[in-house]
Amino acid sequence: ILNVEQSPQSLHVQEGDSTNFTCSFPSSNFYALHWYRWETAKSPEALFVMTLNGDEKKKGRISATLNTKEGYSYLYIKGSQPEDSATYLCAPFGNEKLTFGTGTRLTIIP
Amino acid sequence: GAGVSQSPRYKVAKRGQDVALRCDPISGHVSLFWYQQALGQGPEFLTYFQNEAQLDKSGLPSDRFFAERPEGSVSTLKIQRTQQEDSAVYLCASSPRNPTESNQPQHFGDGTRLSIL
């Protein structure tokens, strides 16, 4: 079982501010790192799948970086909007399956 | 719709009853996954299928849990003699390629919230 840690557990951010949070995972036997966004009463939605060390991906105001040697990924949100309120889950792929962290619950304050 | 569909959305059962949860994956998707999400936790892997073959069921918590996908499309997760600790959200996901392909994002349903009284 992979040990996946996400921090912080929860976060309140003022609308318009930028924020970031962390996913830590074992660096050995790395294959891929997935990020998902899960809004209340909806289904988890894939944001990024990252495979290469130093990779950086961007989707609108959201971006992510990956360091496979030290086993961490950062997710950044620029200019937070109310629709960014959700739980953000990371999941490394190992042993032929995804192992999810407990998530970072982000609340945007209007 | 074109997404993953799960039913029912909510299920309340008495301890000891059997329940069946259904997942309709995206048409043509090869892989289907089941996860259990307890309160305050991330989704935990239960089992996955490649077409009709159940390749990994290592995450099933006990022999009361059983999953099938007989025709390689719709899947059912059955829980026999439910216990209170089975209360959780059960998520289903599918992807178009083989389940061992690490770079394939998974497409999730809305989940079934199961409450055992």
Image (cartoon, coloured by chain):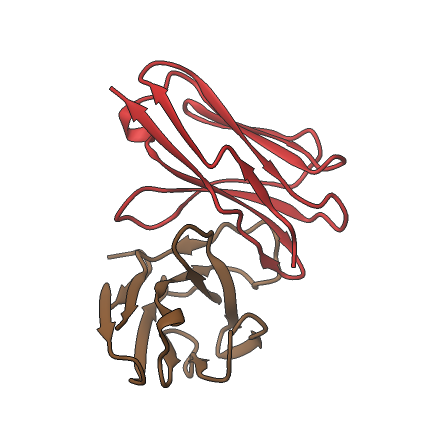
Q: Which residue: 43% across, 76% down?
A: B72
Q: Position of residue A108 (x, y in %)?
A: 31, 25
Residue B81 vs A49, above or below: the answer is below
Name the spot of residue A11 as percent of width and height, x first: 41, 28
Residue B82 lies left or right of residue B29; in this view the side is left
On the image, the x and y values in percent for residue A102 come to 49, 47
Q: Residue at x 32, y 32 (%)?
A: A85
Chain A colour?
red
Q: Return the residue nearer the eye: B86 or B92.
A: B86
Chain identifier for the brown-coloured part of the image: B
Q: Quadrant of residue A94?
A: bottom right
User: B95 left or right of A17?
Assistant: right
- Quick one: A54 or B85, which is closer to the camera? B85
Residue at image coords 67%, 61%: A95
* Residue in the foreground of this view, choosing between A99 and B93: A99
Instruction: Please tell me how many numbered marks the rendered image carries.
Output: 0
Which quadrant, please, contains the N terminus of chain A?
bottom right
A23 vs A59, left or right, is right
Q: Quadrant of residue B71?
A: bottom left
The answer to whether residue B54 is above or below residue B98 is below
Quadrant location of the C terminus of chain A? Answer: top left
> Which of these two is toward me, B20 or B116?
B116
